[in-house]
Image: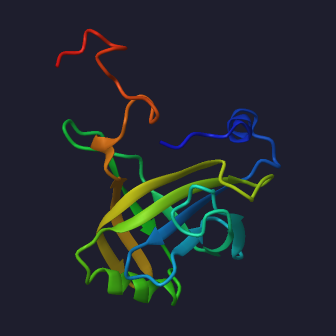
Amino acid sequence: MASHSEALLEAYASCPPSARVYHTLEIWQSSFDVPARVVANVGDDMTFGIELSGPRNPGETATFIACPFESTYPEQRQGQPPQTNIKIDNVNRQLLPKIRAALGYREYISVLYREYLATDLTQPSYGAVEFELRNVKVVGTSITGTVMVKNLQNKRFPRLTRNYDYVQFPSLLP
């Protein structure tokens, strides 16, 4: 899973005026020629760096389109992965045809969420966290849907770099 950078944790704790956080989404499906990237709560398009481990355009800078989006807090239900609703408003002419075409495929739309700190736009301060976008509805220039963490049940816990084995943990049953 993604982790917060030290600078982002400091910005959350002290909240100085210069510590603006930009929330971004990268929307992708195999039917897209290029990923659709949006940034919330800005007036103009912005350029951000993609992390070196990014699935598309790693290490490059990419333009994110100014487009408001919002989500609710995730639901917590027993036996189900957390999921939340997302709404992207004022979708532009480039993104809307892509989403409509993607609805014709039997494949979920992938959404990457990243946070950037205004003091360092070269790489994300948090993320990327990958979600699957499901139950997509297009109404006018708004897109709504449900997002859930992709393949949550197969993620390693508590750390992505550690396997539990019988040698280190003898109380595990075979």
Residue at left offset 40%, top offset 65%: 110
Q: Residue at x 37, y 28 (%)?
A: 163
Depth check: give the residue in front, 163 or 81: 163
* Picture mark count: 0
Q: Among all residues in the image, which is located at the extreme front?
A: 167
**174 or 86, which is in the foreground?**
174
Nearer to me, 97 or 170: 170
> Where's residue 125, x and y in %?
66, 48
Residue 9: horizontal and vertical position, in percent?
A: 68, 36
| Residue 157 visible at all | yes
Q: 173 left or right of 170?
A: left
Quarter of the picture holding the C terminus? top left
111 left or right of 21?
A: left
Q: Is residue 161 left or right of residue 19?
A: left
Residue drawn at (68%, 68%) of the image = 60
Image coords of residue 107 (percent x, y) = 27, 72
**Relative to residue 16, is residue 74 drawn left or right?**
left
Quadrant of the image occupied by residue 123: bottom right
Residue 48 in the image: x percent, y percent?
70, 65
Q: Quadrant of residue 30?
A: bottom left
Observer-nearest residue: 172 or 36? 172
Whether residue 75 is visible, yes or no, is no
Q: Residue furthest top?
A: 171
**Image quadrant in which you'd find residue 155:** top left
Colour basis: rainbow
